[in-house]
Image (cartoon, grey):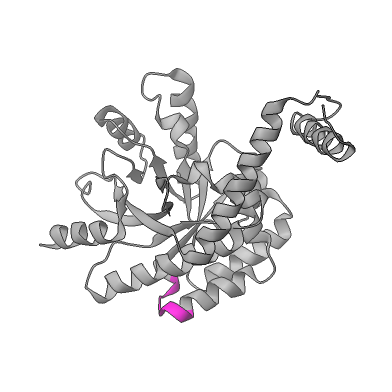
Amino acid sequence: HGQTPAELIKHADLAMYEAKSQGRAAWRFFEPRMAAAAYAALEMESRLARAVRDGEFVLHFQPQFALAAGAEATLVGVEALIRWQDPERGLVLPDAFIPLAEERRLILPIGRWVLAEALRCAVRWRDAGFAPGPVAVNVSTQEFQSPGFVEGVAQALRDSGARGDMLELELTERMLMEDVATVRAALLRLRAAGVRIAVDDFGTGYTSLAHLKHLPVDRLKIDRSFIADVPGDAGSVAIAGAIVNLGQRLHLQVLAEGVETEAQRAWVAAQGCDAQQGFLAGAPLPAAAFEAWLRARRG
């Protein structure tokens, strides 16, 4: 699998990493596709580094609406969703680049930009007289565990002129369960600044309920994989209903992600879910289009 010692070692290395990705005690022969995949990842890393340097990222915003009886049109928040405006490939969705950004630690500068840009938009909307609720920003594990994360959030709030209650940080279940004491201390500091905390994709991770009840969390977001199959699938109905019930008993807000049909909306509303987010209520919009949408609502 190589014409030179260096090439042979490089290809053996690729096979080793392929084996590691499959778990413990595995082995793989080198295949040409491994080299092609490695080259593609290297090229993507180079493109991502350029995107960070040249500011090629944009934010789209998706509204979140209340589900309480008579309050379906009440806007309770908005989620900031990153997109990559690649000069060659056009608009790239996050699933295509966020995993590599996390692997190469490019997620740190990207995350700082997302937070700063989301807060700038929130302040602009506030000054224009809009009240869309807090802007939700996703936080990666690397960001949350990086030294000075809480201080960085506080600095971003000061730099933008935003209040803490204009921001909601979305963390995954896995992040909350790693070193619970340290996580709790960080969340308490964020809450002291007025920042809201949401658990994203709830139901897909490894949350210990014994720990969850001690964490300063404001909202649970039911993962879209469960909402997609309600009300027809008994398993999804059981899990989604249990999450709503859990949130109510812990006095937490519960939001259903990925609501795309009227049947789904009616079902989560009937369970007592507090809010919805999805294409049924509103698709993600570029910042300018979302601001125009806000103006139209106010008008």
**Quarter of the image with the C terminus in it:** bottom left
Q: Is 79 above or below relative to 109?
A: above
Which of 85/207 is in front? 85
Q: Quadrant of residue 50?
A: bottom right
Residue 239 falls inside the magenta stretch: no
Q: Quadrant of residue 1?
A: top right
Residue at the front extreme of this rendering = 3
Q: Is 284 above or below relative to 160?
A: above
User: Quick check: 290 left or right of 53?
Assistant: left
Which residue is pictured at 29% across the width and 61% down the height? 132
Which residue is pictured at 34% across the width and 68% down the height? 121
Which residue is pictured at 89% across the width and 37% down the height? 5
User: Quick check: 259 left or right of 93?
Assistant: left
User: In this view of the protein, can residue 213 be seen by the observer?
Assistant: no
Horizontal and vertical percent position of residue 55: 46, 64
Which of 193/293 is in front? 293
Which of 164/20 is in front? 20
User: In this view of the protein, can residue 116 be seen by the observer?
Assistant: yes
* Highlighted range, magenta: 158-164
